[in-house]
Amino acid sequence: MLQNKQGIVFGVANKRSIAWATAQALAGAGARLALTYQNERLRENVEELARTISGTLTLQCDVTKTEEVDQTFARLREAFGRLDFLIHSIAYAPREALEGAYLDTSREAFLTALDISAYSLTELARAAAPLMTDGGSIVTMTYYGAEKVVPNYNVMGVAKAALEASTRYLAAELGQRNIRVNAISAGPIQTLAARGIGNLNVMLKHHAERSPLRRNVEAREVANVALFLCSSLASGITGEVIHVDCGYNIMGF
């Protein structure tokens, strides 16, 4: 499905991350990959995973540092020449902002969440677009807390709302270059990032009880939709938020 395609995945932290499940799905479909890690602390984990996929390039990229973003895409240009897809699976807010009252969110926590979780998509898209000479696909990860109030999701819900709006604006502007931009709204999954949310276990139990499929979604199911969006099968889809949450979002109460 993705033979002779090349792309980069941002957000791999460990083997349980949605980004890693997505990388495996993309590689399994024949794509050549680059994986990024935020800093030296995560380097060993990501490089160990990358060694399980032949020919995978690993690059350090802290998206809060423009110089590292520029270096990453310069390396990609040298190694790959062109880019066909980009996976943005990055989100962060200080732990204290993901519990208690949203009203108590500090300015610093708000700006941090919006910078890393939302603005980074715009910066990465801007850097990737010149390499997508034959068109391409950009896929980001969001959550239902962007649409409705989810206890303890707080500032991350606001950041994800900005991310979803960015998806639409980027899709409108990049469409003339045949670059598609879409978001996947995944149900809650036990990942390293998700464990920072207060009462995650309560959220998982509620989703499993209320979703039409009566279970929680798995990372591989989210990854399969990302694979679809990166393939020619999704050539007419852009600017969308696709829910992959076992149907939870359709329920009223």
Image (cartoon, rainbow, N blue to C red):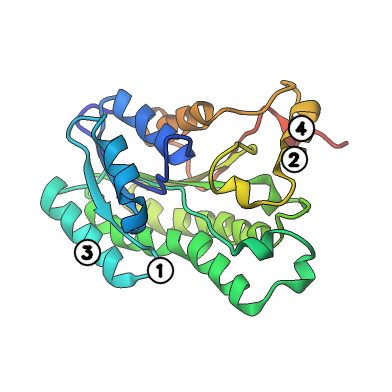
Q: Amino acid at mark 3?
A: Gln
Q: Residues within 10 Å of mark 3 (few under 14, many from 20)?
A: some
Q: Amino acid at mark 2?
A: Met
Circles 4 and 2: CB atoms closer than 8 Å:
yes
The residue tagged 1 is 64
Q: Residues within 10 Å of mark 1 (few under 14, many from 20)?
A: some
Asked if residue 37 is positioned above or below residue 249 in the image, the reply reads below
Nearest-to-viewer mark from 1 and 4: 4
In space, the residues marked 3 and 2 are separated at their CA atoms by 39 Å
The residue tagged 2 is 203
Earlier along the polypeptide chain: callout 4 or callout 3? 3
The image quarter containing residue 205 is: top right
In space, the residues marked 1 and 4 are separated at their CA atoms by 34 Å
Earlier along the polypeptide chain: callout 1 or callout 3? 1
Q: Residue at x 60, y 56 (%)?
A: 160
Circles 1 and 3: CB atoms closer than 8 Å:
no
Q: Residue at x 68, y 59 (%)?
A: 98
Q: Of the numbered discs in the image, which one, if any, rests on residue 71? A: 3
The residue tagged 4 is 205
- Name the residue nearer the viewer: 35 or 211: 35
In space, the residues marked 1 and 2 are separated at their CA atoms by 30 Å
Q: Residue furthest right?
A: 253
